[in-house]
Image (cartoon, rainbow, N blue to C red):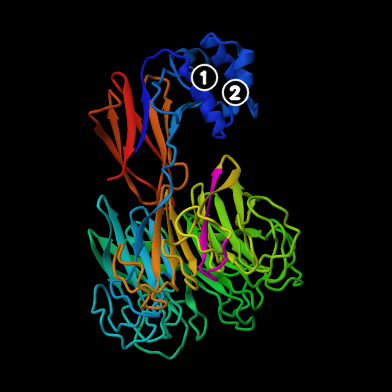
Amino acid sequence: MRIVGIRESRIAKVLVLLHIERLKSGMIYSKRLSISLAKMINVNRTAFLRQSSLRCLFGWRLLCAVIGAQLVSTTGVRSVGILSRCALLMTAGLSWSAASATPSQQAYLKASNTDPGDSFGGSVAVSGNTMVVGAPSECSNATGVNGNQNDNSAGSSGAAYVFVRSASGWSQEAYLKASNTGANDQFGTTLAVSGDTVVIGAPGESSQATGVNGNQSDNDAPYSGAAYVFVRSGTNWTQQAYLKASNTELLDLFGISVTVSGDTIVVGANRESSRATGVNGDESDNSAQYAGAAYVFVRSGTNWSQQAYLKASNTGGPGYFGGSVSVSRDTVVVGAGGEGSSATGVNGSQNDTNAPYAGAAYVFVRSGTNWTQQAYLKASNSGSNNYFGGAVSISGETVAIGANGEPSNATGVNGNQSDKSALNSGAAYVFVRRGTNWSQEAYLKASNTEAEDLFGLSISISGDIVAIGATGESSNATGVNGSQNDNTAPNAGAAYVFVRSGMNWTQQAYLKASNTGAGDFFGGSVAVSRDTVVAGASGEGGSATGVNGNQSNTNAPDSGAAYVFTGLGSGPQVSVVPDGTGGYFIRFDGAPDTPYRLQRAINVTGPWETIATLTGPPAGGLLEHHDMPLSQAFYRTVQP
């Protein structure tokens, strides 16, 4: 719940204490404003500045300070009541960003039909209050939605499970299977969710159909792969589409990666072998073995069609282009962990192949129905076998890229990249777009970097939060921010959460399972949506079923589990911006496809009136409502 208010008040000396409190927590303030505040409350400005240990950066443009009526003269904004220690005033208007709750584990999830070897948690995805967990080695012969889970005659056919969160916690809503379930199809290897739409990859599927809703019955193209689209109406799920490549061939592994944003789906096929480059090239040439490709599908009404066939601008085999994909509105990023150029940074030379498996990522943008490549991204410390692009994720104007083979011994943010003494420790890189130009913003390493930790094997970004998995991490810690020094649980795995303030990234949390065990591979999959992070552990061995069952029983090796953590990030910022006519724009960032009730009251204690219901855009982003309060007003957002 986020609250910001507008009312008439006087500045009291508590403003000084509040100001200093915020400084201690790392906020950046304007020196000019601090002097103005000191004058307003009749304190000695020199003493005030000395006590606050102020730093002056960017002057009035970063003007953040405590609030009160007498600031009208310097901001032109009506006064604001002091609601909490997190209240801020900015030049554009009034804003309040809630301090995040203490990060904690919210749920321990298991399949409804837990069995040894199912690898539940091999993939995870979350959007608002909906989460999907894949179990690519699940073995039932069921088809469709909520079928018979007890038949185990289709080994590694795979399944996916939908969970929803309500006020009472998480519960399973659906059990999803392919419409043409077959042994070794590995349905659930990858998956993604956007609102009421889920897409699930099955790279082992073997039909030779092409396009959308083709013939599913033949198995003449082993491991050609497929993807399946499911949609929800109310609480009921149905399959909407069966997707295949436009140039289906055996061993292409279409479905090895999937992503969805609104009505756009992208599916990767990292072993597709055409030599085409760019967009919609010749699909029939197979002279570049395992170069890889990605396919864009769009929905009109309930019908899906292929919109684009994407290839690298420097296609070569084995590049494994399409091994990872991510979409946010009209921007797609495609990873190619096998790409071999030694270029660094953005749009460098693509022509040399002197760094095998250094990896790359490619950014494509859509204008109307046309796609073009916008950027070619490389690590700032490209090196052979770094597998940069093995995992990618995009949110708005920010891309996060994992390189699980990167070998530096650095820790934290923007450390020394030149040390190569920690083989396969792994790293992650953050890139941002300004206009049409991309640049690297951060180089991220684990806080406890060690060789073979594979930090960056999985990655997910939502707004200013990045979650990064490291399946090889071996500490015996449990929960949040435990001891990282014990290495008695080989390959237990961990996940790391980083948050951004302005352009600066810091590690906020070190996540471990509540029942950490060797070989659990916690962090093999991660997903983040606003303050919620989900981590999968496909090697976990508990025999429990459902939500928050008994974690101590380990009679089901490699059955797998997923863990939900909340209270991460800094919380969405609510701003109240005057329109110049007595009204206000209330603005805040919404999580992808998540509904919010915007409420108003004349007193912070209520009663609260819902004045608008707003839903976050498919990729998350700004929500705005205009209001004309008749008197003093307080605002808050509440999730239904």
Residue 13 in view: yes
Q: Quadrant of the C terminus?
A: top left
Query: In x, y percent, where is residue 191?
Result: 42, 68
Residue pictured at 64% horizontal, 29% vertical = 58
**How busy is the neighbourhood of tag 1: few (under 14 within 10 Å), some, or many (20 plus)?**
many
Q: Secondary structure under badge 1? A: helix
Give the answer, above or below, for where 32 lies relative to 573: above
Label 2 amino acid?
A: Ser
**Which residue is at the front of the view, 244 or 148?**
148
- In magenta stretch: residue 588: no
Segment colored magenta = 486-500
User: Which residue is drawn at the image coordinates 33% and 58% (left, top)?
Assistant: 130
Vertical side of 636 occupied by 30: above or below: above
**Residue drawn at x 56%, y 58% as measured from the top left:** 484
Name the side, left or right, on which 499 lies relative to 630.
Answer: right
Secondary structure beneath dot 2 equals: helix
